[in-house]
Amino acid sequence: MRALDKIRQKRRFEMFNDRSREKVLELNAFFGKYIMHFEEKIKKVFTYYDTPNHDLEKSNIVLYKTQIGNFTELNMATEKSNSAFRYSMRTNYKHFTKQIKAHDSILKHKEFLIDNFTNMFMSSINFDPEFLMRKLQVAYTVTTTSLEYRSLNYSGLKITYSFDKDIYFNNFTNQTVESNILTIYQHSAEHTDEDFENVIGKLTRYCKELTPTTETKIMIARRLTSLKTAPNQVDTKKLDKMKKKVKKS
């Protein structure tokens, strides 16, 4: 996906493995309503920051640096804790961004951090943003190798399929876990929403290689790299059960 593409909305799926991409492409070709072409292979790095006490997570704030190709951006946003509130949260959701250099320390952008820590809260805050800022460190790193496809149809619908091979690293637990994720981004205007939902509905119904998820990447990183969840064992059992269901159907 082009770094400056405007995203109207997105949906995310967990994939069985990196070969699930072939199933999605086959399904798209079977329906025949969409023109899809390979666009690029790109590396993305998402670096998430927090304090050792997880103060940002507890405050429903996500602070992260996004690196896509030569484009780097510092982000501070409201935590999207549940996509069931996707539409109702639009009035409360806040997202502040600043384009920076790839190797910049976040402390180099002190004014951005302090101003927006204050702006994240609707009422006055009872902590010192500068004190909190000094405690920040890298909490999670998500390194993504993405195969990206562009999809179009006659109505003007424009979609990017990002087939991601993610590597999640938790700096607090020192755990590294891999996962395959498909994220579908809608770039076109509101009048194409129905067609976008039609694409998502068909994939959900017919592609058994995919499991819809409401989690953001930071949520997936937390879940898979937590010592309490023993991620490698849990995910393997879940995957085996799902594969058996597919073979039976």
Image (cartoon, rainbow, N blue to C red):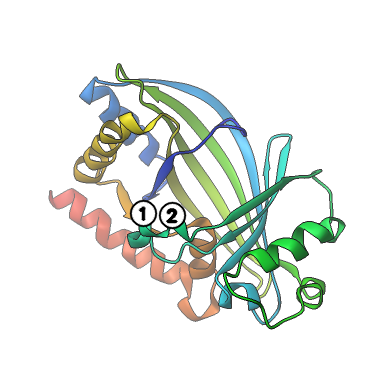
Q: Residue at x 24, y 20 (%)?
A: 32
Residue 221: image location, x then y, percent = 54, 63
Residue 54: image location, x then y, percent = 63, 77
Q: Which residue is mark 1?
A: 87
- 124 displayed left or right of 194: right
Name which residue type carries label 1.
Answer: Tyr
Up-down relation of residue 41 to residue 116 (above or below)? above
In which quadrant of the rendered view does residue 204 lie? top left
In which quadrant of the rendered view does residue 134 lie? bottom right
Q: Which residue is mark 2?
A: 90
Task: Answer whether residue 139 is visible to the viewer in this image.
Answer: no
Residue in front for this viewpoint, 83 or 19: 83
Which dot marks residue 111? none
Residue in front for this viewpoint, 79 or 115: 115
Q: Residue at x 34, y 29 (%)?
A: 25
Instruction: Assess whether mark 1 and mark 2 are in contact (beta carbons under 8 angstroms).
Output: yes
Secondary element type, mark 1: loop
Q: Residue at x 22, y 24 (%)?
A: 30
